[in-house]
Image (tube, grey):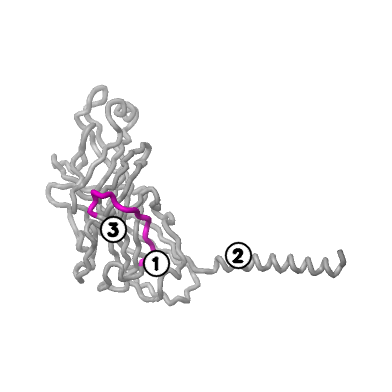
Amino acid sequence: MKITNLIAFACLLILSACNKEDDSNNSNTNPQMSFQFKFDANQERLDGFGNPATIPDGHAGQSPEFNSMSVHYIEFVPNQLTPIEGGAVVYTGETQTAESSSQFDDAIKWDEAIVAGADQTFLTLDLSTLPPGTYEYLRASVTYQNANVKFNLNNLPAPLPSSLLNQSGTLAGFIGFNTHVDSLIVKNHTVYIGADKPQGFWAFETQLDDPYQALLEQYADPVQIGQSPAGATTVVNPLSQFGITLPQGSCIVTGALSEPLVITGEETEDVTVTLSFSVNKSFEWIDTNGNGEWDGNSNSFEQVVDMGLRGLEVGVN
């Protein structure tokens, strides 16, 4: 090969490498918007209208230790008069046609849901997904929560002791409008459902002190399932006072941004959006014996009435 041809070939290789490097750099220049969760037991406990709330007489509650969460829908809201889906919807999870027995047309596909724990990245999008404008609120439709709670077991069969107090367990709760669940890993055990489940469906797995868990599993299923009453799940919507209503059975929690987010379309830096949920006694049950603790036996527990999160505060950095 002639020297001139070698030089030309080398120049082509260098130019090609430079173009690939430029393409790689260009693919990373778009600013990103990441979402993460925070679970705060000290954040104010609110009712469905966004007002401070206490535990009703005859009920009790505890602040769970959250492991993970999933949301189905995220919407940035310009102001308090913006109707549902009237803002900028930047994320919607996967759905499928609901079962014929359901009151809903669609069901959230649990097996394709994104799940993340505290301070983990739940979702990352191009910041350009959010149209230019000023946003004061955010709506997030919570689908699923997985958290540890404390409980007591009483009236247990031998060879177990009659009572086991201050035990730990994992609660997997579905609070979306309608979720199709094929199977679910609560903590260590898998539950097979194969059906659409309405808001308030839950599964609970015990983790008894050694050696009692192994003994319990000889006599009873370590996972129990249940359903909180229809309409009992608290969904915080402080914009209800402005006439903003939520779809029936949804869990679209609304929270104010710490300060309005202004998007010009000329942004060059990444943005992290932190959704801080109040878990302040968010797990609530009917306290039949008045001891303020969640009690059960090997077959059933005191009736769970609410797993709704108790407020949302949104930070943008």
> Is residue 281 among what the camera can see?
no
Type of amino acid at the residue the image marks with label 1: Val
Indicate the amino acid at tag 3. Gln
| Drawn side of residue 225 relative to residue 96, left or right | left
Q: Nearer the viewer, residue 178 or 276?
A: 178
Decide which of 136, 184 is in the foreground and name it: 184
**Quadrant showing the C terminus:** bottom left
Residue at 29 percent of width and 32 percent of height: 221
Distance, label 1 to label 3, CA atoms, is: 18 Å
Residue that label 2 marks: 24
Number of other residues with Cα within 10 Å of mark 1, as a class: few under 14, some 14 to 19, many 20 or more? some
x and y percentages locating residue 232 in the rendered image: 19, 52
Residue 43 badge: 3
- The mark that comes first in sequence, 1 or 3, is 3
Q: Residues within 10 Å of mark 3 (few under 14, many from 20)?
A: some
Q: Identify the mark at residue 271; answer none if there is no mark.
A: none
> Closer to us: mark 2 or mark 1?
2
- Residue 29 appears at what percent x and percent y? 54, 69
Vertical order, 310 against 157 (above or below): below
Mark 2 residue element: helix
- What is the magenta range? 89-103
Cα–Cα span, label 3 and label 2:
43 Å
| Residue 100 lies in the magenta-colored region | yes
The tag earlier along the polypeptide, 2 or 1, is 2
* Residue 274 percent coordinates (x, y): 38, 61
Q: Nearer the viewer, mark 1 or mark 3?
A: 1
Q: Spatial distance from mark 2 to mark 1, Cα to Cα?
A: 28 Å
Residue 209 in view = yes
Inspect the image, locate mark 2, and give the three-letter code of the amino acid beneath it: Ser
Q: Earlier in the sequence, mark 3 or mark 2?
A: 2
**Residue corresponding to mark 1:** 316
Looking at the rendered structure, the secondary structure element under dot 3 is: loop
